[in-house]
Image: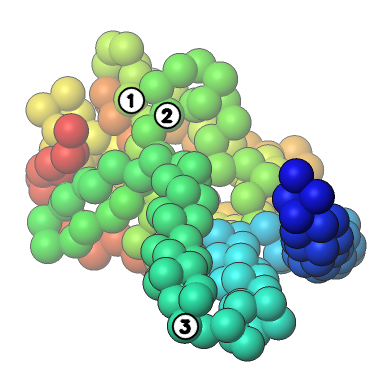
Amino acid sequence: MSNFFATFFYFFPRIFFFFLKIFRFFFRQFLFFLKKIFRNFKKIFRPAQIFLFLKFSVQKIYSIFFAPHREFFSFFKIIFLKFFPIFCATFFFSCQKNFTKLKIGDQIFFVEIAKTTQQRARGLMFRRNLPKNRGMFFIFEREKIPKFWMKNVNFPLEIIFFSAEKKVVEKISAEICAENCPKISPKMPIKFALELPKNNFRGKIGDEFFLEK
C-alpha cells in the first residue's frame, strides 16, 4: 500500500500540472480569439479563419507538449493533426447557410431559398456583399405581381422573374437606394424570382431554370 501511495503522489502532481498547462494554453487562445471577434466581428467570424485558428491551436499544443514524446504520442499526432481539423472544418461549414443549386442555361448559381413571408421580406437586406455565383431565390405561393425594393441593400442587384412554367419572363436592374426607394415589380404575374449581384446573369427571355432538390 505504501508503494501505491508513493507512486500516486509522485505521478499525480506531474499529470495535474501537465493538463493544467494544456488548459491554460486553450484558455489564453480562447481569450485572444474572443478579443479579435469583438474587434471586428464580421471580418473574423468566417469558417476559413475559424479553421485556421483551430489548426494553429492543435499544432501549437503538439509542438509544446507532445513533440518531446513523439514515439509515445504518435497516435495523438495522427488524430489531432489530421482528422481533428478536418472534422472541425466540416462542422463549421455545415453550420453555414444551406445553398441550393440552380441552373439557368449554361450558368449555375448557389441560392438561398426564400419561401416564407419573413424570408421574402428580408431578402438580401443588410448583407455586406454577395459572391458572383450566389443569390436568393424567391418562391411564391401563387402567381402574383410582387413588390421588391432596395432599402438596406448594400450592392446593386439583378432581379430575374420567372413564370409558373419556370421560364424567364423579365429582368430588372436595381441600384443601391438609401431613402425614398421606389418599388420594383414585374410587368406580369410571376411565380419565382431570383436576386443576383448585378451583371452576373447572361441568360435571355424564355430560358428555363432547374432547381436541385
Contact (CB < 8 A) between labels 1 and 2? yes
Eyeballing the image, is 123 above or below 178?
A: above
At horizontal 28% and vertical 55% (from top left) the residue drawn is: 109
Eyeballing the image, is 138 above or below 95?
A: above
Report helix, strand or loop for mark 3. Answer: loop
Query: Mark 2 sits on what residue?
Result: 114
Quadrant in which the N terminus is drawn: top right
At horizontal 11% and vertical 56% (from top left) the residue drawn is: 105
User: Which callout, 2 or 3, points at the residue further toward the start of the chain?
Assistant: 3
The mark closer to the camera, 3 or 1, is 3
Report helix, strand or loop for mark 1. Answer: strand
Residue 213 image offset from top left, x and y in percent? 18, 33
Query: Mark 1 sits on what residue?
Result: 139
At horizontal 27% and vertical 23% (from top left) the residue drawn is: 191
User: Which callout, 1 or 2, points at the residue further toward the start of the chain?
Assistant: 2
Crowdedness near tag 2: few (<14), some (14–19) or many (≥20) residues, C-alpha within 10 Å = some
**Mark 1 is on which residue type?**
Ile
Q: Which mark is residue 71?
A: 3
Report helix, strand or loop for mark 2. Answer: strand
